[in-house]
Image (spheres, rainbow, N blue to C red):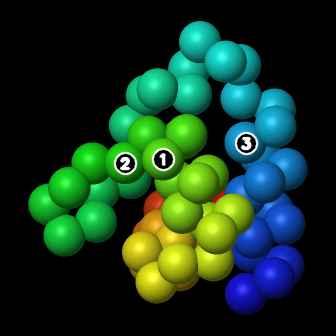
Amino acid sequence: MEEKRAKFISAYAKVPESLRDDIIVTIEKKPYTWTTSYLEIKNNTELGKKILKALENIGII
């Protein structure tokens, strides 16, 4: 899980600020932006883990 978190944080750092409010994933019919995903993943929440798995499945990380 730590490797996935590191990959996401690295990818997030490369995203221009103007795009960080764009939706990147939908979990349980709720959309999440780069920024909200970052906060969930950084804080290692259960939602963050679901987001990481979804991002891995769609090839972002």
Name the kind of residue labelled 1 in the image: Thr
Q: State the CA–CA distance, disc 3 to disc 1.
A: 11 Å
- Circle 1 sits on which residue? 36
- Circle 3 residue: 12
Give the image location of residue 40, x and y in percent.
54, 63
- Categorize mark 1 by other alpha carbons within 10 Å: few (<14), some (14-19), many (20+): some
- The residue sitting at 73% across, 42% down in the picture is 12
**Name of the residue lying farthest toward the top:** 18
- Judge by depth and name the residue closer to the eye, 44 or 33: 44
Secondary structure of the residue carrying numbered label 3 = helix
Whichever of callouts 3 and 1 sits on the residue coming sooner in the sequence is 3
Number of marks drawn: 3
Vertically, is 7 above or below 20? below
Q: Position of residue 48 (x, y in %)?
A: 52, 71
Provide residue 55's location: percent of width, then percent of height.
Answer: 53, 63
Amino acid at the residue labelled 2 = Tyr
Up-down relation of residue 55 to residue 19 (above or below): below
Which of pointers 3 and 2 lies earlier in the amino acid sequence? 3
Mark 2, mark 1: which one is toward the viewer?
Answer: 1
The residues bearing labels 3 and 2 have C-alpha atoms spaced at a distance of 13 Å
